[in-house]
Image (cartoon, rainbow, N blue to C red):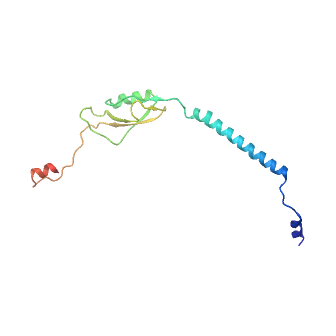
């Protein structure tokens, strides 16, 4: 009973000093966070990502794998030979047929290039069973 009367007598009006203090703290937090974000995006992030520094990817189509490896390591680029091989009789074996990113692209130092090489042997074609059929049917198959 005593507790109820104390609650009824108290008014829950916010103190003006308390409201000013909260507004001040929220304003300070917004200013500090904005300054931190500005410093991060304008100064620290460009330094970490080497903004504006790039290497031009050389044209390596038709060049042997050994020469490509030495050229790319001199330019601080990495490479990986893809699992997708192709065969073109115009090029010697184990030469570059395709590269990604393409030649002339601007990339960061240490970027990995993906190379597709010309295979050592032409791909074998699976032939269907052509025995006991007509010549025309064999051409169609």
> Looking at this view, is 62 or 139 the one in front?
139
Q: Position of residue 11 (x, y in %)?
A: 86, 61
Q: Kindly indicate the quadrant of the structure image that contains residue 112.
A: top left
Q: Position of residue 105 (x, y in %)?
A: 43, 32
Q: Position of residue 65 (x, y in %)?
A: 34, 32
> Looking at this view, is 121 or 24 the one in front?
24
- The residue under the point 85% across, 49% down is 17
Q: Position of residue 136 (x, y in %)?
A: 11, 50
- The residue under the point 62% across, 34% down is 42
Q: Considering only vertical position in the picture, is 13 above or below 2?
A: above
Q: Kindly indicate the quadrant of the structure image that contains residue 39.
A: top right
Q: Kindly indicate the quadrant of the structure image that contains residue 89.
A: top left
Residue 117 appears left or right of 75: left
- Indicate the quadrant containing the N terminus: top left, top right, bottom left or bottom right: bottom right
- The residue under the point 16% across, 50% down is 140
Residue 72 appears left or right of 122: right
- The residue under the point 39% across, 34% down is 102
> Looking at this view, is 36 or 88 the one in front?
36
Residue 109 appears left or right of 139: right
Q: Residue furthest bottom?
A: 1
> Looking at this view, is 105 or 69 the one in front?
105
């Amino acid at each position: 009973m005593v507790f109820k009367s104390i609650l009824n007598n108290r008014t829950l009006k916010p103190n003006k000093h308390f409201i000013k203090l909260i507004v001040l703290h929220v304003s300070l937090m917004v200013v500090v966070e904005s300054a931190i974000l500005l410093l991060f995006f304008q100064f620290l992030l460009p330094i970490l990502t080497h903004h504006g520094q790039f290497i031009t990817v050389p044209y390596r189509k038709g060049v042997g794998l050994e020469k490509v490896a030495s050229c790319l390591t001199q330019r601080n680029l990495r490479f990986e030979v893809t699992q997708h091989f192709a065969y073109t009789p115009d090029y010697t074996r184990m030469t570059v047929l395709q590269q990604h990113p393409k030649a002339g692209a601007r990339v960061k130092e240490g970027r990995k290039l993906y190379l597709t090489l010309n295979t050592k042997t032409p791909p074998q074609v699976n032939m269907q069973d052509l025995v006991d059929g007509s010549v025309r049917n064999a051409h169609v198959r």
